[in-house]
Amino acid sequence: MDWFPLLNSLRIAAISSVIVFFLGVAAAYYIARLPRLVKGVLDLVLTLPLVLPPTVVGYLLLCLLGPRRVIGAWVLENWGTKLVMQWWSAIFAVSVVIFPLMYRTARGAFESFDETLAAAGRTLGLSNTFIFWHIRMPLCRQGILAGAVLSFARALGEYGATSMIAGYTPGKTATISTEVYQLWRTGDDATALKWVLVNIAISAVVLLAVNLLERKEGRKKS
Amino acid sequence: MSLSVNIHKELDDFTLNVNFETAGDMMALLGASGCGKSMTLKCIAGLEKPDRGRIVLNDRVLYDSEKHINLPPQKRRVGYLFQQYALFPHMTVRENLETAVQRLPKERRKAPVDEKLRAFRLEGTDHLYPHQLSGGQQQRTALARVLLNEPECLLLDEPFSALDTYLKWQTELELGELLRPFMGDVLFVSHDRDEVYRLCSTVCVLADGKSEEKVTVRDLMAEPHTVSAALISGCKNFSRVKRIDATHVKCLDWGVTLETLQLVSNICNYAGVRAHSFHIAKSGEPNRFDARVVRVIDDTFSTILMLAPEGGTSLIRMEMPKNEWRAMRNPSVVLLGVAPEEVMTLSGEL
């Protein structure tokens, strides 16, 4: 069995999760401070990928990144590389799809944070950076970590947008999800089942991690 | 040493209009909950921005709307003791204190922290987390943390409200002791007149977001001039009045005319009498009138009578020692009296 799809899925999920972790946390932190109207609009736009079919996300991304489209053409001209049909193209697709998960959980964690603690820190002369990294983040850690693990799990399972923007090239852009579809399509049920079991195993471990984190948090609060 | 505050801020349900100046003492900001006390403190600390005004601490301008000065809380050197103490729950007592000396290089942080731990009797608890401490220890930790930052003035927001009644007294005594070495001004926010009476020298009453003139606590209790000051000082009985002359008012709600010792000013529109200032009168006394006993309530240490004065429309609350009431054998009408010096002539709205 060729293990490339597993490696590819893992590296796409890992890189996307790290990117989205920082973007999602930053967005959650700054958007909470905006005026109500702006907040509402941004909230809607940023959460939309959660409810849109991944194929719609894929379509919209192709409209931006395709070799004949604005960004895609510009990059092709200046760097001589296409943004689609590469193994890392899937990172764009996966990041957009999992962003709302990270953003929403981080925002939930920040909203339950007691702002008096930040206020106390400020009157004690602590910088906002210190307050963020030493007070806010540690106290919201469990919620944010759960969000990160959940987005990693979702990243592993992304199919629709990925298949549209990275396609399926064995040994190049194949991921577990696209591999399963390809194997089923070509009638190789036995290998498809193996990949299905691998996928279920990884996802189960990840979800177990989420549950453990949430239980720990519940205990801490009580 | 002085903190001068003059701020104006529109809020959802009222307008904050606060104006006072402390003068090197412990001043109380006294008012019912929701009257803008905490908001005033937040404006002084820089956590909220007033719409306009000026805040000056020891000749340093913290906020001036005209000159567009608005120092961030970090630069104000205003110590703020929060109602629930706001200790960082994921840090030990020692770590909590260390956050207040971040300005010092790492190797010089231990000494001042150790000194405060000793002075605040927290030595054995330095490795504990806030939730493992008693209420009093939490408060001492919070106060030690605030003082480690060497503030120029101190804001105490209802420091005893998070404690059980029975811990309060002990903590109150302690707080007085611990604050003694502090040289700056202290602003003490409370809704409890007894606390204020015991701890502070001067007081500024805040009613519906508006501050009244600063007075000494003794004056506030003995001779309040406004209805809100009388109310917050614990006065239970009020009647609208009509001025008759400089020493007589007609109490419209009680249907009686009372002689006063305080001169009745032209703006006087209310009279106030404390529940324990009423007594059972003998014939021939001034300010006596009949009142029907409507209800008798047995309180912890006294008996409370709800009385309907003849010809009046509102009830009078009177408190007397239990044995005195028992000796009277449940009369249905009593002859009520109040000494002229006990009648407070007030202005304002109830």
Image (spheres, coloured by chain):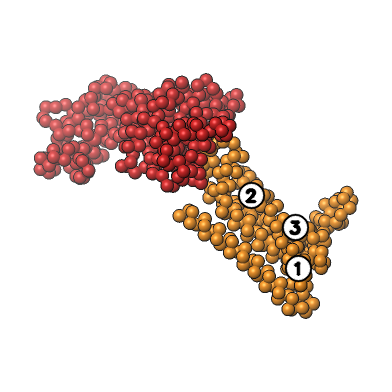
Chain colours: A orange, B red
Which residue does the numbered mark 2 point to in the structure image?
Answer: A25
Do pointers 2 and 3 mark residues of a single chain? yes
Tell me the chain of label 2.
Answer: A
| Of A187 and B240, the residue lying toward us | A187
Name the image quarter holding residue B287. Answer: top left
Q: Are marks 1 and 3 in contact (CB under 8 Å)?
A: no
Residue at the (63%, 58%) spot, across then down: A149
Horizontal side, residue B150 vs residue B160: left or right: right
The crowding category of the residue bearing disc 1, from other C-alpha atoms within 10 Å (few below 14, some 14 to 19, many at least 20), is few
Mark nearer the viewer, 2 or 1? 1
| Of B192 and A121, the residue lying toward us | A121
Tell me the chain of label 3.
Answer: A
Residue at the (85%, 51%) spot, across then down: A75
- Mark carried by residue A3: 1
Q: Amino acid at mark 3?
A: Ile
The first of marks 2 and 1 along the sequence is: 1
- Mark carried by residue A91: 3
User: How far apart in space, not on screen, are marks 2 and 1 (Cα)?
Assistant: 33 Å
Mark nearer the viewer, 1 or 3? 1
Residue at the (52%, 57%) spot, across then down: A216
Horizontal side, residue A9 vs residue B161: left or right: right
The first of marks 1 and 3 along the sequence is: 1
Place of residue A164 in the rendered image (x, y in percent of width and height, measured from the top left) = 78, 64
